[in-house]
Amino acid sequence: MEIVSYNNCAELDALAERWNYLGRQGLYFVPSFPELRNRLEASGCKFRLVVALDNSEITAIACFIYSNVNKNYEIATRKLFRLPVKVVELFGSCVLGEPSENVIRKIFHLIIEEGGFDLINIGHIFVDSPLYKAVTSLHNVIVWNVTRKKQLWWLIRLPSSFDEYISSLRKSARIRIARDYRRFEREAPEFRVLQLPEEVDIFLRDAEKISHQTYQWNLSYGLCNNESTRQRFIRLAKNGDLRCYITYLHGEPCAFGWGQLSHRKFLFRQTGYDPKHRKLSPGTALIMRMIRDLIENTDCEVFDFLWGGEDGYKSRFGTVHLSCASIQAAKIYKPYSVLIAALDQVLNLSKNLVGLVVELGPVKARLRSALRRYGVGTY
């Protein structure tokens, strides 16, 4: 087994075919090769694209991107302070292919020995994956979970028909989803799929109208129809990665969702609905339409909801759930890196105490009820 590193954009094209081949393996979403190239060329940053060779055949690929950032420390929405940090990020939070733990450790050892960073940001990964097991067993490295607790990653293994998908749901979820879906469909909504560069302006214009009515907007998580978002969507559309969905009720935009379709996997990015229609469950209806479209009109095999809790809409629609964690790592003998890790752990402890208070009594129920009035995705 040989490990080879590339650090020049001019060398990337030779790896495109293998990137796409390996990207189709596994359950995790892998960004398309044009997205990788755009990320590296747009930022002009230092990177290492590391490949594992077995008898001259590439069996695994990982890309690490170096950057200088300000790491924010906060509790809830209250910002406490921030520190300058040299970060090396694992692009896509994945190692392409299906390499063993030993191969992954060799890839990371190459990056660690090179140095030039305060921490490695690995991102959200499956806890039972070879990547997680390899990273957590590295020598002379401290590894920690950025979030206060492990989460669940929700997926759908898309079957060959929409009816098969419906049948695969738990009985209680199937009954609830079907009831909500029929309620909305009785209003005769218009459903549109938008994926071309010339359709981006239409989607962003109407999706922003909806997003402006949701709770995410006040938290700065809404979908904004600005130039940077427009250019990003146009780029994804030109690469064939963009898939946007929107429903209209009585001629007005009512609910939207969008994501990236790459390597036969759909990554669910964002959704929102106008809270004045919440009694009609427009969010449920939209996601059902999205799933049906992907099954009937694409070669998609996996619908990736990303991470979420044990309740809420992702748990109702998802057919597969895996434990995941947001992982960072650093050299154990570097004092500044150890300080960063210690600060994360102290904040996580504080968040756990706050979370315990919220979970007690009727506080959680009242909070969820209040959020639903503002278009939160509980549907």
Image (cartoon, helix red, strand yellow):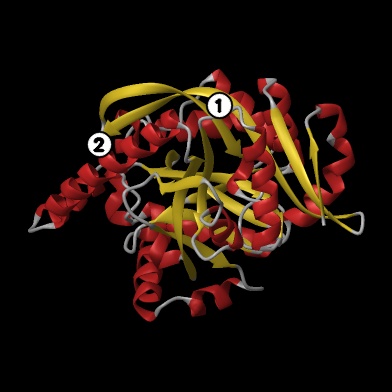
Within-10-Å neighbours for mark 2: few <14, some 14–19, many 20+: few
Residue 15 versus residue 227: which sits nearer the camera? Answer: 15
Q: Which disc number belongs to residue 229?
A: 1
- Amino acid, disc 1: Thr
* Percent position of residue 30, x then y: 66, 49
Q: Quadrant of the N terminus?
A: bottom right
Q: Quadrant of the C terminus?
A: bottom left
Q: Which disc number belongs to residue 199?
A: none
| Residue at horizontal 39 percent and vertical 33 percent from the top | 340
Mark closer to the chain start, 1 or 2: 2
* Percent position of residue 47, x then y: 70, 30
Residue 286 visible in rendering: no
- Amino acid, disc 2: Ala
Residue 279 visible in rendering: yes
Q: Mark 2 points at which residue?
A: 76
Answer above or below: position of 128 versus 188: below
Label 1 sits on a secondary structure element that is: helix
Q: How many labels does the image show?
A: 2
